[in-house]
């Protein structure tokens, strides 16, 4: 019974300490957490759990560890508020991923952000063609901020009672240097056709292609490793 009471006491004490320090450290919405915030939160939570249930860990040692981590986090936050260079070093900086419909592959590589993630986040914003994007920026929290091209965000063709050519979703045909054979029957094309299209753009090695897709008008959109 004494062991259960000790466990209860340790849990309550740890809980109160965590509540106090999370209040002191400030609030952020989950969607606003950077990778640094995430790692710090996981670490402090793990320390709290160890203090609460591990008998071999002295309560005072656990509290000191929690206080130290919390104090360092608060100190870092205060410094980064005034020092933009340090803030960019810790939280990273926004990266331009698409500029005027063109994917900036070197920035994707810098952020370890793959083409699959980009396409998924664009689809989540109801954007199915990369060419519809004026600017896309990868934020420090991993979210993608997108600005559509002006002609897609101003007066719509429905407002002006104008018939618009049929559009559709861009079909993926090459991903990370590999031709997606299962997609070819859907566009009624073969691998030779794809290779000829790439050759017309002076792309002779399929492995140089990060992404290629075919639009509704059968135009090819290509992203290469060198950004050309």
Image: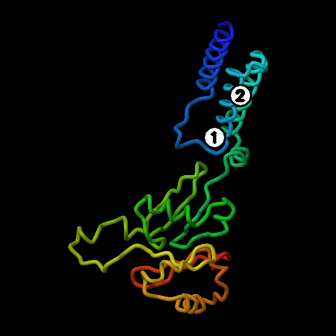
Left or right, 207 with respect to 129, comes to: right
Q: CA distance from mark 1 to mark 2?
A: 14 Å
Residue displayed at 68% across by 11% down: 3
Specify the quadrant of the image occupied by residue 179. bottom right
Residue at image mark 1: 38
Residue displayed at 55% across by 92% down: 192
Return the residue found at the far left. Answer: 161
Return the mark for residue 75.
Answer: none
Find numbered disc 2 in the image and state the secondary structure of the residue it sits on. helix
- Between circles 1 and 2, the one closer to the viewer is 2
Rendered position, 35 above or below 59: below
Disc 1 packing (10 Å; few <14; some 14–19; many ≥20): few
Specify the quadrant of the image occupied by residue 127. bottom left
Residue at image mark 2: 47
Considering depth in this image, is 145 or 31 the residue closer to the camera? 31
Count how many numbered circles sit on residues in the image: 2
Q: Earlier in the sequence, mark 1 or mark 2?
A: 1
Disc 2 packing (10 Å; few <14; some 14–19; many ≥20): some
Considering depth in this image, is 66 or 187 the residue closer to the camera? 187
**Position of residue 40 measured from the top left corner of the image (x, y, whole percent):** 68, 36
**Position of residue 143 measured from the top left corner of the image (x, y, whole percent):** 54, 53
Considering depth in this image, is 25 or 7 the residue closer to the camera? 7
**Position of residue 157 measured from the top left corner of the image (x, y, whole percent):** 27, 72
Rendered position, 72 above or below 202: above
Specify the quadrant of the image occupied by residue 18. top right
Left or right, 30 with respect to 79, comes to: left
Rendered position, 87 above or below 69: below
């Amino acid at each position: 019974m004494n062991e259960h009471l000790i466990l209860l006491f340790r849990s309550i004490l740890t809980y109160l300490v965590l509540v106090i320090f999370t209040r002191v450290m400030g609030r952020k919405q989950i969607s606003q957490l950077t990778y640094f915030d995430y790692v710090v939160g996981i670490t402090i939570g793990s320390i709290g759990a160890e203090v609460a249930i591990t008998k071999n860990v002295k309560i005072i040692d656990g509290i000191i560890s929690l206080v130290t981590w919390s104090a360092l986090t608060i100190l870092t936050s205060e410094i980064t508020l005034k020092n933009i260079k340090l803030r960019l070093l810790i939280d990273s900086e926004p990266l331009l991923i698409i500029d005027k419909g063109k994917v900036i592959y070197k920035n994707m590589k810098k952020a370890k952000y793959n083409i699959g993630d980009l396409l998924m986040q664009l689809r989540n914003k109801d954007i199915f063609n990369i060419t519809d994007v004026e600017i896309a920026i990868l934020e420090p929290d991993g979210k993608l901020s997108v600005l559509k091209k002006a002609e897609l965000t101003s007066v719509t063709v429905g407002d002006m009672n104008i018939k618009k050519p049929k559009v559709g979703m861009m079909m993926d045909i090459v991903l990370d240097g590999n031709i997606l054979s299962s997609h070819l029957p859907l566009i009624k094309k073969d691998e030779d056709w794809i290779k000829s299209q790439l050759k017309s753009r002076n792309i002779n090695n399929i492995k140089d292609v990060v992404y290629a897709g075919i639009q509704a008008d059968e135009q090819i959109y290509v992203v290469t490793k060198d950004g050309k």
